[in-house]
Image (cartoon, rainbow, N blue to C red):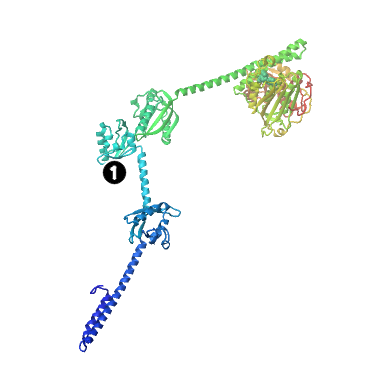
C-alpha cells in the first residue's frame, strides 16, 4: 500500500493523527531525559505511529475485501444472467459448474446438474460428435465448435452450438452453449424457398435469362437449354442478343433499348435454336438486381403452341364449309369472314370487312339478331338460334347461328358460325304440307267410305227388308231356302261393309265413343239372346253368367261394347262345331270409382296355334288362308275389337289350345251410371225368365219421311206390324207440309233427301213461324252415317234421337218406346218388362212372329263361370 496523498479518507485521517503525535512528543521528552530516557518516548511514539499505520492498513484491507466481494457478486450475476449457457466440465465430460442459462437450456434445475454427465442431456444422435468435441477441446485445440440437439418433451428438439476451451492446465474445460434453433429454422426456410424458387424457375416454360448489364448471360433456366438446344456452359457468357437469328440482332438491340427506356413492352422477334431454326417468342426485358449485383432480366414466352393453335384455327376458319365470321367488340364490325361466308351470302370481302350487319342489311330481322347478340354478350356463347339472313341479291336464307366470344391478341371478338338450313326448312315445310295433304286425303277417304257405306247400306236395307217380307209370305220349301240364302248373304255383306267402315273410322281417328247410361244386364241378355238362337241352330250349348258384384247400371258406349262381344261370340260360334260357347262378365277388383269390367268368351272349337296368337289382332289376319274358304270372314273383327277395347281403356287377349278351344277376354273401363242409386245396384242373380211379348203402340201415328222407295216399303212393313198408323212423306218439304196439316206422335226422318234434307226440315218444324201443329213433336233421325259427328249434327238440328240404317225392328222398338209409351222413358225398357231374362230370343224374333221359346239345350245356370 502506498503512502501519501493516496488512500481512503479513513487512512488519511489516521495519517493526520500520527503526524500530530510526532510533532508534539520531542518537546515533552527533551529537557530531563537520559539517552535511554530520551529514546523511550521516541520508541513509544514510533510504536504509536506503527499502530496507527497498522490500523490504517487493516482498514484498507477490509475495504479491499469488500470491494472484491462486490466484484465477485457482480461477476456471478453476470455469469448467471448471461444469454449463453456456461458449463465447466472435467476431462470425463462431467458437469462441475453451470450458469442459470445453461441449466435452463438443459431444462434441469442447476442444483441437480453438478456431477452429471453432460452427454446424458443431449439427443442420442448428437453424443458421438459431442464426445469428439470434448476430446478436441481438452487436447488444447482452439476455436472448436459443435452443433448438437437437445431433446424437448413433446416437441421439436432444440438446436444448440457448443464452443469450448481447456482451462486449469487441461484438467477442465469451459463450454459455451448458444441456442441456434431459430437461426437453423430460418436457414432451413431460406433453403426451402431457394429450392422452391429453383424448381419454379426450372419448371417454367418461359425462357428466363439473367445477364450482366452489358448483356452477357449469367444464368439461364432449363427452358432455355431445352428450347434452344445450347448447353448451360455454352450459354454462360454468351451475348443475349446472339440468341436471336443473325439478321434480327440489330433490330432486337434497338427494341431492347426502347424497352429499357420504357417505350416498349415486348419484342416480337423470334429466337434461334442452336441448329438455326426459329422459335416464335414474345420477349420482355428489364433492369434489376440478382444476388446483389446489377443485371438485366429477359423472359421470352414460347409462342409455338399458340401459333399452332392459331394456325389450326385459321385452317378451320378458312376452309370451313359453314359461313363463319369474326367481328370486333363492342362495335360488332366484321373483322374477318371465311370463303363460305362470302359464297353463301354473295358479298366480296371488301364489302364486308369493317361493316356492321345493319349497314349490310344482313339480317331479315335486326331486332332478333340484336337479341341473340345480347345473349352472346351475357353468356359468352349462343347455340342454335334460328335467324333469317339476306343475301346481297336480296334472297332470304334460313340460318342456324351459334357463336362464342373469344379473345385474340388482347381483343374480344364474336366468332359466329351459321349453318344454312334453308333446304331443311323447305323440306320441313314440304313435309308439313304433305302431311296436311295426307291427312286431307285420309279424311276424304273416310268420308268416301262413310258415303259409300250409306250408298251400299240403303239398297242393302231394301234387299234384306224385302227378302224378310218375302219370307213372311207363303213360299214353297225351295223358294224359302233360296230366300233364306239371299237374306244370309245380304246380312254378311252388310256386316262386311260395317267392318270396313269401322276400321276406316278407327284409322282416321274418327271413332268416338258414346257416353250414355245403360244396363249391362240387358246388354248381355240382348247379345246372349241372338247367340242362344244361333247355338241352338248348331246344336251347341250356350252358357251365360255374370259374377256377383258386377255393377249393372253403367255409363259408356253400349253399342261398341256389344259390338266387341258379338264379334268374339260370332267367332266362337263360327269356329266351334261341337260342345259349348260361354259368355262371362265380371269386375276386376280394386278398380276404383270407374269399374274395370272383364268379359270372357270361351268355346270348345278348333283353337288357335300358339305361334299365331300374336298377329291375330292385326288387320286382315286369319290363322291360315284356308280360313276364308272354310269359315268366311275378313280378318277384321279382332282388329276392330282391339281398337274398340283400347278406346274403352281396356286390353284384349286370348288363351287357346289347338283342337281344344279358345278363350278370348277383354277389359273395359266404364263409369257408373249418373243415376248413382241405380248404379250401386249389382246385377241380380239370374233366374230363368220368359220371352218378351211384342210392343203394342195401339194406333199411335207415325210420320215416315223417306225418299227411297224400297226403304219406305221395308219401314212400313216393320212399323205396320207394331200396330202403328204410318204416313209417308217423300222429302223434307212434304214432311213440313204434313206436320202443318196434322199431328203425329213421332216423326222418323231420313237425313239425306232431295229438295229439303232432314236437318233442314227439322229446323223448320221446330221454328214456330213454320206453322207445324206440334213444333215439339219427337223427331228420330234415320242415319246411314254411323259416325259420331253425324249424330251430333242431328241432335244439334233439334232431333231427339237417331237410329242407324238399315233399320231393324230391335233398335226401332228401343227408340219408339221412349216416345210412344207412357211413363218416363227408360233406356232398354222393352227388355225390362219381361223381368230378368236369361234365354230370351232375339228382340226381333218376337215381332216377326217366331215364338219366344227358342232355348238352348240346357238352361243357363246362375253364376256359371269358366
Ligand atoms: P274373321 O273372323 O272375320 O276372319 P277375326 O279378326 O275376327 O276375323 O279373326 C281372325 C282370325 O282369328 C280368324 O280368321 C280365325 O283364324 C282366328 N280366330 C278368331 N276367333 C277364333 C276362335 N274362337 N277359334 C279359333 N280361331 C279363331
* 250, 422: nearer the viewer: 250
Q: Is residue 742 left or right of residue 448?
A: right
Q: Position of residue 346 (x, y in %)?
A: 37, 23
Where residue 152 sits, quadrant-wise, is bottom left
Quadrant into which the N terminus falls: bottom left
Label 1 sits on residue: 288
Quadrant into which the C terminus falls: top right
Where residue 384 sits, quadrant-wise, is top left
Whether residue 734 appears in this view of the structure is: no
Q: Position of residue 542 (x, y in %)?
A: 75, 23
* 500, 336: nearer the viewer: 336
Q: Is residue 494 left or right of residue 17?
A: right
Most extreme residue toward the bottom, as rendered? 32
* 476, 813: nearer the viewer: 476
Q: Is residue 863 left or right of residue 353?
A: right
Report the image quarter containing ligand 1.
Answer: top right
Q: Is residue 556 left or right of residue 425?
A: right
Where residue 316 sits, quadrant-wise, is top left
Most extreme residue toward the left, as rendered? 31
| Residue at x-position 37% and y-position 62% | 80
Q: Position of residue 242 (x, y in %)?
A: 26, 35
Amino acid at each position: 500500500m502506498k503512502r501519501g496523498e493516496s488512500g481512503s479518507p479513513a487512512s488519511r485521517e489516521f495519517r493526520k493523527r500520527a503526524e500530530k503525535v510526532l510533532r508534539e512528543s520531542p518537546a515533552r521528552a527533551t529537557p530531563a531525559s537520559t539517552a535511554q530516557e530520551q529514546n523511550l518516548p521516541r520508541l513509544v511514539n514510533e510504536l504509536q505511529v506503527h499502530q496507527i499505520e497498522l490500523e490504517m492498513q487493516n482498514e484498507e484491507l477490509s475495504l479491499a475485501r469488500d470491494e472484491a466481494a462486490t466484484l465477485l457478486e457482480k461477476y456471478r450475476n453476470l455469469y448467471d444472467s448471461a444469454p449463453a449457457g456456461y458449463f465447466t466440465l472435467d476431462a470425463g465430460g462431467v458437469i462441475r459448474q453451470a450458469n442459470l442459462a445453461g441449466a435452463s437450456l438443459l431444462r434441469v434445475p442447476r442444483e441437480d446438474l453438478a456431477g452429471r454427465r453432460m452427454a446424458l442431456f443431449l439427443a442420442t444422435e448428437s453424443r458421438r460428435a459431442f464426445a469428439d468435441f470434448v476430446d478436441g477441446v481438452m487436447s488444447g485445440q482452439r476455436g472448436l465448435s459443435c452443433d448438437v440437439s437437445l431433446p424437448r418433451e413433446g416437441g421439436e428438439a432444440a438446436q444448440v452450438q457448443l464452443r469450448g476451451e481447456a482451462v486449469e492446465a487441461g484438467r477442465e474445460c469451459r463450454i459455451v452453449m448458444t441456442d441456434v434453433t431459430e437461426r437453423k429454422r430460418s436457414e432451413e426456410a431460406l433453403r426451402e424457398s431457394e429450392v422452391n424458387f429453383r424448381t419454379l424457375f426450372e419448371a417454367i416454360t418461359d425462357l428466363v435469362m439473367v445477364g450482366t448489364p452489358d448483356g452477357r448471360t449469367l444464368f439461364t433456366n432449363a427452358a432455355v437449354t431445352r428450347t434452344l438446344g445450347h448447353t448451360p456452359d455454352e450459354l454462360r457468357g454468351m451475348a443475349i442478343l446472339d440468341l436471336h437469328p443473325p439478321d434480327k440482332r440489330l433490330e432486337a438491340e434497338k427494341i431492347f433499348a426502347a424497352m429499357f427506356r420504357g417505350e416498349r413492352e415486348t419484342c416480337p422477334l423470334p429466337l434461334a435454336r442452336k441448329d438455326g431454326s426459329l422459335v416464335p417468342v414474345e420477349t420482355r426485358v428489364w433492369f434489376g438486381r440478382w444476388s446483389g449485383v446489377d443485371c438485366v432480366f429477359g423472359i421470352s414466352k414460347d409462342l409455338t403452341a399458340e401459333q399452332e393453335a392459331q394456325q389450326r384455327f385459321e385452317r378451320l376458319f378458312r376452309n370451313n364449309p359453314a359461313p363463319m365470321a369474326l367481328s370486333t367488340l363492342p362495335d360488332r364490325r366484321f373483322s374477318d369472314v371465311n370463303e363460305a361466308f362470302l359464297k353463301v351470302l354473295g358479298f366480296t370481302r371488301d364489302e364486308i370487312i369493317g361493316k356492321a350487319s345493319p349497314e349490310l342489311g344482313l339480317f331479315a330481322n335486326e331486332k332478333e339478331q340484336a337479341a341473340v347478340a345480347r345473349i352472346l354478350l351475357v353468356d359468352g356463347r349462343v347455340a342454335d338460334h334460328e335467324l333469317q339472313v339476306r343475301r346481297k341479291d336480296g334472297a332470304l336464307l334460313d340460318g342456324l347461328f351459334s357463336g362464342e366470344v373469344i379473345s385474340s391478341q388482347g381483343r374480344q371478338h364474336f366468332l359466329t358460325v351459321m349453318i344454312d338450313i334453308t333446304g331443311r326448312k323447305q323440306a320441313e315445310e314440304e313435309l308439313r304440307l304433305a302431311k296436311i295433304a295426307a291427312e286431307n286425303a285420309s279424311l276424304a277417304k273416310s268420308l268416301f267410305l262413310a258415303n259409300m257405306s250409306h250408298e251400299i247400306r240403303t239398297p242393302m236395307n231394301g234387299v234384306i227388308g224385302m227378302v224378310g217380307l218375302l219370307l213372311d209370305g207363303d213360299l214353297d220349301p225351295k223358294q224359302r231356302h233360296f230366300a233364306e240364302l239371299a237374306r244370309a248373304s245380304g246380312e254378311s255383306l252388310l256386316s262386311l261393309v260395317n267392318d270396313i267402315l269401322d276400321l276406316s273410322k278407327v284409322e282416321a281417328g274418327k271413332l268416338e265413343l258414346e257416353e250414355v247410361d245403360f244396363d249391362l244386364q240387358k246388354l248381355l241378355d240382348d247379345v246372349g239372346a241372338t247367340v242362344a238362337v244361333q247355338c241352338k241352330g248348331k246344336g251347341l250349348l250356350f252358357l251365360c253368367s255374370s259374377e256377383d258384384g258386377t255393377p249393372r247400371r253403367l255409363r259408356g258406349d253400349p253399342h261398341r261394347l256389344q259390338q266387341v262381344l258379338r264379334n268374339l261370340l260370332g267367332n266362337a260360334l263360327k269356329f266351334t262345331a261341337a260342345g259349348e260357347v260361354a259368355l262371362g262378365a265380371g269386375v276386376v277388383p280394386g278398380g276404383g270409382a270407374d269399374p274395370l269390367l272383364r268379359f270372357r268368351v270361351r268355346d270348345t272349337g278348333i283353337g288357335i296355334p300358339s305361334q299365331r296368337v300374336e298377329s291375330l289382332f292385326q288387320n286382315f289376319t286369319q290363322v291360315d288362308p284356308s280360313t276364308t274358304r272354310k269359315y268366311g270372314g275378313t280378318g277384321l273383327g279382332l282388329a276392330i275389337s282391339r281398337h274398340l277395347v283400347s278406346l274403352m281403356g281396356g286390353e284384349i287377349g286370348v288363351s287357346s289350345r289347338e283342337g281344344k278351344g279358345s278363350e278370348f277376354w277383354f277389359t273395359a273401363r266404364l263409369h257408373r251410371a249418373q243415376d248413382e242409386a241405380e248404379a250401386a245396384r249389382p246385377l241380380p242373380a239370374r233366374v230363368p225368365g220368359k220371352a218378351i211379348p211384342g210392343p203394342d203402340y195401339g194406333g199411335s201415328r207415325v210420320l215416315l219421311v223417306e225418299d227411297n222407295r224400297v226403304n219406305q216399303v221395308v219401314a212400313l212393313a216393320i212399323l205396320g206390324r207394331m200396330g202403328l198408323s204410318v204416313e209417308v212423306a217423300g222429302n223434307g218439304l212434304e214432311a213440313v207440309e204434313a206436320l202443318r196439316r196434322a199431328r203425329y206422335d213421332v216423326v222418323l226422318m231420313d237425313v239425306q233427301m232431295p229438295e229439303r234434307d232432314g236437318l233442314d226440315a227439322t229446323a223448320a218444324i221446330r221454328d214456330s213461324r213454320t206453322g207445324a201443329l206440334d213444333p215439339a213433336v219427337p223427331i228420330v233421325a234415320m242415319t246411314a252415317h254411323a259416325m259420331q259427328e253425324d249424330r251430333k249434327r242431328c241432335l244439334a238440328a233439334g232431333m231427339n234421337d237417331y237410329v242407324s240404317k238399315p233399320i231393324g225392328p230391335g233398335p226401332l222398338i228401343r227408340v219408339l218406346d221412349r216416345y210412344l209409351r207412357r211413363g218416363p222413358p227408360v233406356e232398354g225398357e222393352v227388355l225390362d218388362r219381361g223381368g230378368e231374362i236369361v234365354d230370351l230370343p232375339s228382340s226381333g224374333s218376337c215381332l216377326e212372329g217366331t215364338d219366344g221359346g227358342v232355348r238352348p239345350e240346357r238352361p243357363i245356370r246362375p253364376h256359371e263361370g269358366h
